Image (cartoon, grey):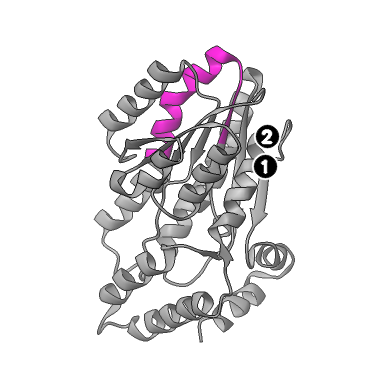
């Protein structure tokens, strides 16, 4: 395969990361999947990929991951920063420890891995970094302050990085998924309900949990393969755009956010959680 790439994908044990890894393997690329739950990546190994145990917040594991990949392949063409999760709960109810952990995974862990990869891409004078943000990096929802803060931060961080890396022929691409059928909802809802139980935000938390479950139960979400297919297209596109929105609700929400006033958009968002 003339355009075969060496690709590292974080958060590859489930959802969008796993589907993207398998899709890219089928297209003939050399794929390394990285995640904390290495036992969940055996299907990737069976398909011909490699699995690395990685907690993006662990400095030693981040360095070892990149060192292993370079030792085995001699280069890295594409980094897909996909690892992330959502901490939901009222600002009053979420501890600062939980909030900091959210930033450590969704922003600082991603940033550190990127820092370790970049010298190799600069030496190659080529590379592509694909940051999986969210439509939540442009919009907002109640009880999602800390999650949205990380994704808003990732958007700005990625834009700055794109300018810095342009002289080295390294692309930075942002992907903003909408509602995607993954573990996201369960990971978000159960801790949120526990945080809010019996408190002033209990009713709102119940409404948001019900709304989230309805979205997935009714099938009002796109399969993870939609994002996986899109990542594969970005990998092989010669000159990708700087950002893409994909998946259920993504483009309509971004359209409304752009053209509606803040208070009008507030009404749209709150109408979804009643």
Q: Residue at x 72, y 64 (%)?
A: 255
Q: Residues within 10 Å of mark 2 (few under 14, many from 20)?
A: few
Q: Is mark 2 on a helix, strand or loop?
A: helix
Q: Position of residue 12 (x, y in %)?
A: 42, 45
Q: Position of residue 211 (x, y in %)?
A: 49, 80
Q: Where is residue 2 in the image (x, y as percent from the top left)?
A: 67, 22
Residue lying furthest front in this view? 46
Q: Do the residues labelled 2 and 1 touch (CB within 8 Å)?
A: yes
User: Above or below — where is 141 with respect to 150?
Assistant: below
Disc sitting over residue 236 in the figure: 2
Q: Which residue is drawn at 53% across and 12% down?
A: 123
Asked if residue 242 shows in the view, the reply is yes
User: Above or below — where is 245 with respect to 259?
Assistant: above
**Rendered image quadrant of residue 65:** top left
Q: What element carries label 1?
A: helix
Read off the residue under disc 1: 233
Where are the magenta residues, as a range?
109-129
Residue 272 appears left or right of 194: right
Closest to the observer, 78 or 223: 223
Q: Which residue is drawn at 53% across and 76% down?
A: 215
Q: Position of residue 79 (x, y in %)?
A: 51, 33
Q: Does the magenta stretch include residue 87?
A: no
Q: Is residue 112 magenta?
A: yes
């Amino acid at each position: 395969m003339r355009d075969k790439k060496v690709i590292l994908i974080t958060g590859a044990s489930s959802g969008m990361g796993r589907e993207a890894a398998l899709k890219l393997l089928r297209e003939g690329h050399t794929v390394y999947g990285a995640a904390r739950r290495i036992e969940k990546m055996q299907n990737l190994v069976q398909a011909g990929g490699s699995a690395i145990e990685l907690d993006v917040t662990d400095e030693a594991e981040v360095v070892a991951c990149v060192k292993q990949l370079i030792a085995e392949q001699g280069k890295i063409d594409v980094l897909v920063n996909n690892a992330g999760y959502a901490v939901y709960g009222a600002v009053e109810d979420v501890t600062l420890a939980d909030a900091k952990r959210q930033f450590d995974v969704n922003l600082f862990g991603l940033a550190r891995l990127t820092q370790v990869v970049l010298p190799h891409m600069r030496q190659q004078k080529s590379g592509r970094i694909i940051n999986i943000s969210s439509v939540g990096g442009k919009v907002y929802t109640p009880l999602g302050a800390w999650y949205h803060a990380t994704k808003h931060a990732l958007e700005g961080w990625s834009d700055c990085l794109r300018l810095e890396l342009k002289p080295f022929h390294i692309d930075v691409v942002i992907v903003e998924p909408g509602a995607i059928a993954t573990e996201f909802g369960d990971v978000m809802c159960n801790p949120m309900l526990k945080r809010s139980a019996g408190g002033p935000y209990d009713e709102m938390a119940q409404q948001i949990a019900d709304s989230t479950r309805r979205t997935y139960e009714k099938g009002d979400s796109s399969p993870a393969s939609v994002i996986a297919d899109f990542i594969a297209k970005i990998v092989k596109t010669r000159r990708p755009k700087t950002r893409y929105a994909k998946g259920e609700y993504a483009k309509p929400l971004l359209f409304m956010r752009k053209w509606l006033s803040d208070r009008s958009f507030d009404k749209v968002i709150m109408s979804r959680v009643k």
